[in-house]
Every structure is written in structure tokens, then in C-alpha cells.
Amino acid sequence: MKKLTSLFLNSRTFQSVLILLIVMCTSTSLYLMDKSVTSFLLLLFSFLLLYYTTFSNWIKWGAGALIAFAVIPVAASGGPSQQVYMEVAVMAGIYIAMALGLNIVVGFAGLLDLGFVAFFALGAYVYGIFASPQAQALFSGSTIFPLGGESFWLFIIVGALVAALFGIILGVPVLRVKGDYLAIVTLGFGEIIRIVFNNLDKPVNITNGALGISGIPQPKLFGFTFTQASHIYFLVLIVLGFVIYAVRRFEDSKLGRSWKAIREDEIASQAMGIPLVKTKLWAFALGASFSGMMGVLFAAKNQFVDPTSFTLLESITILVMVILGGMGSVPGVILGAAIISILNLQILTEITLFLTQNLHVPEVFSPAKMQRLLFGLVLVGIAIFRPQGLIPAKNKTYKIADLKAKLTQKKGKSKETTTSI
């Protein structure tokens, strides 16, 4: 095993051949077979292998985009289980984006947030209220509402802005508390939002209460309606790509370094001139905006939203994804979110079906019923064996010689500009 690992890490030819073989074999079997969960999981595993290769980032991103946008949709289109695979991929993408948003708050800034699903609910309900028949009941006599599926593209931005606004509203009063107290306050905020949506059906029916909002239109673009999961899949990929790019840019920016400084030592960072209030509010607002965007996508995909989709357990699940992958690590959070979401949506379901149909295990003992126990075991295992997560966060390192060379180069360019003027 060690020889194979060293060969993989030291030979780009072996890396290329291995990934190409895995992608070709798994995609072919996925296309030809009616249902092959193993092939689907191995095809997704190629992304992890691609991350550990020694190719340049441009090659990694290009190969990953090719697999995501071309190979997976074509391979999954052969059998009747296409929409099942796409459904899993869509929900995994939504959870990855939300986990990356929470990673800004928890991983970068070190602020424990247990009410993060509230921003997800805000995005979903903002689109649901104004674009569904609920708007017609709310704005009786209006010819504008309900809005059609064409408004989905606008509400992606609106959902992000509304969630960011509420992130600031949450951040302002809770910046004085830390640690466990911060967790309790954010937990309360998440529950307040859920309860408000659950009871906002009287005296004016805004959210339709516990019955939820149905008839939410699916996205439309130039007359084409995104009706199936295989259509929504491409929308999720585009939004997820934007979220990953934005988070990576924030991580290496001045703001990202300020977040990490606050996480390590607030007093020292404040002494260095970092504005604590402003920096923390940016963390809450930006993390919430990504969750609000995915809430709009979630509502458009399901065409239905109700308060049961935004419970405390959802916030804890997203937090587990961040802890499992590695707090502060972008690739780690992506991996942790993918593992937990695929485990919930497909692996546990398949194991349960196998046990109940072939071994006649009572449904009460099925793995799907023991999801909370499995989460607990995963967290205990991570705390013991990988306390920093599956892919620990790595701070960017700089060589003094390179920094001096860049500084000298900049000074030379500035002198040339002054001379030319």
C-alpha cells in the first residue's frame, strides 16, 4: 500500500492513468447498468484523487469541471436511476455550499453558530412567498404577483441579500458574547425564525403556517423550464462554483486574514488594529448570504417549503460537515459535506433496503433510523483520531526571499512609472 501511495504521489503519469481508468470504468458501468451505487460513488471518488495529484491548480479545476459538467450527467443518463443520482448530487451541492458558508463563521472567524439553517429558511421562504400562489392570496387584487419562474434568477440575489441582512441583525447583539453563550444565542435565533414561519399564518396568512407553501415555480430561462433534477444539477454546479471561488478569494484576502487573527486571539488582533465588530459582521453576513442563495435553489427544486425542513438538526448536520472535513479548510469542508450528505441520502438508504429485503432485519434497527447515533460515532472518531479533520487547514506560507523579490520588483516598476511621467 505504501509503494502504491508513493508511486501515486511521485508519478504524474500514474496519476493520469489511474484517474482516467477510474472515470472511464465507473462512468461506463453507470451508463450501462440500471442501477449501480458503487460506480456512482467511485466516480465521485475521482474528485478526491484529483485533489491529491501533483498537477497545477488549473489542470485540477479543468479536469474536475469536465467530470462534473460532462461525464457525470452523461454517465447517469443511461439507466432509469438517472434522476436518483442527480437528486443526490443536487442535495450534496446545496449542503456543500451551506457548509462553506458556515465555515466562514466557524472555521475562519471562530464564531460558533448553531442557527445557521435560519438563513437557509429565509432564502427559501423569500422565493416561496413571492413566486407561489401564496402571493396571490397575500396581495389580493395585484396583477404582478405571483411571479413566474423567470424571477428565480433575481431571487438568487435577493435571497443572498435578505440572508446577509439578517446575518447582520443577528451579529450586532451577539458580538458581546463568546463560546457557549454565542452558541446558545444563535441556536435561539434559528428556532425563533422557524417558529415565526410556523405561526405566520394569522392574523395575516404570509407563510401558510405548518402547511407550508406549495406551487413554487421552477426556474425558467428563455422559455426552458428546469423541471428535473438533472436540469437543476447544472444550476447547483454554477452557484457552487461561484461559492467556492468566493470563499477561496476571501480566505487569502485581508479580510480572511483578519478573521483568522480574531479566531486565534481577539485581544491581540484588536491591538494590531483589526476592527472586531466590522470584521465579525462581515463573517456573519457573507456566510449567511451563501446559505440564502441555496435556500432559493432548494425551494425551486422541491416546489414546496415548510418549517420542518429547517430544524435545529439541520444546523447541527451542517456543523458536523464542517468539523468532519476540517474547520477552516475549504477542500476539507467540501469533502465532509459530500460524505455526510451522500451518507444520509443514499448509502444509509441502500443499506437499509438491503437489510430489510434480504436479511429481514426489523425496520426499527435499520441504519437510516440510527442516523443520529452514526453522527455521534463519527464525531467521536474524528475527535480521537483526526482532531483537525479529514483535510486539515493549511495556512499559506511565504518565503522571505520571494517577498523581497516581489517588493524590489514593485519598487522598480514604480520608479519606471515616475521617470516616464
Image: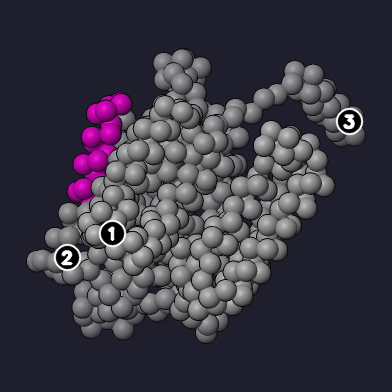
Left or right, residue 305 beside residue 78: left
Position in image of residue 20 (x %, y %): 74, 57
Q: Nearer the viewer, residue 170 or 71?
A: 71
Position in image of residue 204 (x %, y %): 13, 68
Left or right, residue 224 beside residue 372: right
Query: Alpha-carbon distance for marks 2 and 3?
Result: 68 Å
Position in image of residue 291 (x %, y %): 41, 52
Residue shown at 77% from the left, 51% from the top = 16
- Most prominent secondary structure in the magenta stretch? helix
Give the residue pinned by disc 2.
210
Residue shown at 21% from the left, 41% from the top = 188
**Which numbered marker is on residue 361?**
1
Residue shown at 36% from the left, 32% from the top = 380
Q: Badge 1: few (under 14), some or many (20 or more) residues near its Cα, within 10 Å?
A: some
How many numbered circles does the render carry?
A: 3
Residue shown at 74% from the left, 21% from the top = 399
Q: Label 3 near label 1: C-beta < 8 Å? A: no
**Which numbered marker is on residue 416?**
3
Decide whether residue 178 is among the magenta residues: yes
- In the rendered image, which quarter is residue 411 located in? top right
In this view of the protein, can residue 73 be seen by the observer? Answer: no
In this view of the protein, can residue 391 be seen by the observer? Answer: yes
The quarter in which the C terminus is drawn is top right
Q: Earlier in the sequence, mark 2 or mark 3?
A: 2
Q: Badge 3: few (under 14), some or many (20 or more) residues near its Cα, within 10 Å?
A: few
Q: Nearer the viewer, residue 231 or 165?
A: 231
Decide whether residue 190 is among the magenta residues: yes
Q: Nearer the viewer, residue 356 or 412?
A: 356
| Start-end of magenta stretch | 176-193
